[in-house]
Amino acid sequence: MSVLNDEPVAAEDAAVVETDILIIGAGPSGLYGAYCAGFRGLRVAVMDVLPQRGGQISAMYPEKPIFDIAGFASVRGRDLVDSLVAQAEAHGTRYLLGHRAVALDYDGDGLPVVRSDRGTAVRAGAVVITGGVGTFTPRPLPAGEDFLGRGQVYFVPDPAAHAGHDVVVVGGGDSAFDWAALLAPVARSVRLVHRTARFRAHRASVAKVQALGIDMLTDSEVSGLYGAAHLEEVEIRHRTTKDTTRLPAQTVVAALGFLADLGPLREWGLTLQARRIAVDTRMATNLPRVFAAGDITDYPGKVRLISVGFGEAATAVNNAATVIDPEAALFPGHSTEKEN
């Protein structure tokens, strides 16, 4: 059963949680880190501000294929998350979903204590931050957000919800082209609107949309949204001629990018580089017993791929294990050597 098709996992509101490793971020790196901790026999808790597991994949592109996961020529976002969740839960993982990590302190024994915005305190032997790019907020549609939730969306978690619609996708990046291609088979029509004739999207993505015959309106912008209870029409304005055209639309996908913010993490005393957390080769931060992995980290030669995040999560968790227990071995052994 797909975890993304179920109700969101219930968040716990215990006043105090005791664990060996607290992972902040339930995206791919965090979920794999939870598996690595469980594999070592460590208690692990995962905290995330979102109400479901999977991070940006679940929130932004659960239906899109991902092509850079080792061993998979292509894997759908939600299927990857389902597999990571099953892998983590094989050894037991406690989830604190819908909790934003807001404060980090240390107790009298020098152990980190992370407090959430819901009043929960997590006392851990070590903390691993895997929060992706931090909190991400969609850039608003300049025409306004009066129809947000009534036809205007930022994400397309379920393409079937837009079946038979006239869809207008706004943006020129990879997400805009991915949404357009994803919706083309189910929508009545799809148009892509971008303010210039140059696109940020990969050329292969542009070629795919062109091959699908999707109408691309360049040097244009959405200047108005119209309808009663639900979106019915959009107004498109050419940026040079100022001419306007009204088109039928029951869905507008605003794919204009996101504003990333580390939020409360900025106040924890972490060393930051370009709004990301600086780490060493052990994935250790400058703070005692605090590690980081995934897109939120920075170091010379950093490559931001999901596959890289998996390796960083394993490195962070296993180094954290030796901090929790100085007699523990860094290398946990091969999974093939363990009995099921």
Image (tube, rainbow, N blue to C red):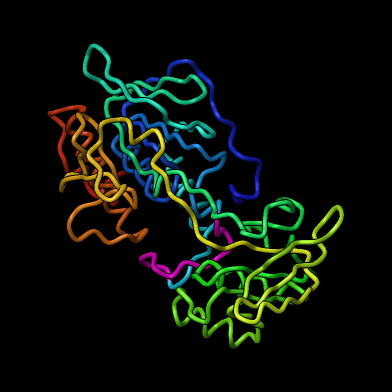
> Magenta residues: mostly which secondary structure?
loop
User: Is residue 2 highlighted in magenta?
Assistant: no
**Residue 190: x and y, percent?**
70, 75
In this view, 290 is above or below 180? above
In this view, 17 is above or below 310? above
As drawn, the residue found furthest toward the top would be 108
Which residue is found at the position 43% from the left and 70% from the top?
67
Quadrant containing the C terminus in the rendered view: top left
Which residue is found at the position 21% from the left and 27% from the top?
324
**Residue 227: x and y, percent?**
84, 59
Give the side of residue 317 with respect to residue 43, left or right. left
Give the side of residue 31 with respect to residue 107, left or right. right
Which quadrant holds residue 19?
A: top left
Q: Nearer the viewer, residue 257 or 119?
A: 257
> What segment carries the magenta color?
60-72
**Residue 88: x and y, percent?**
42, 43
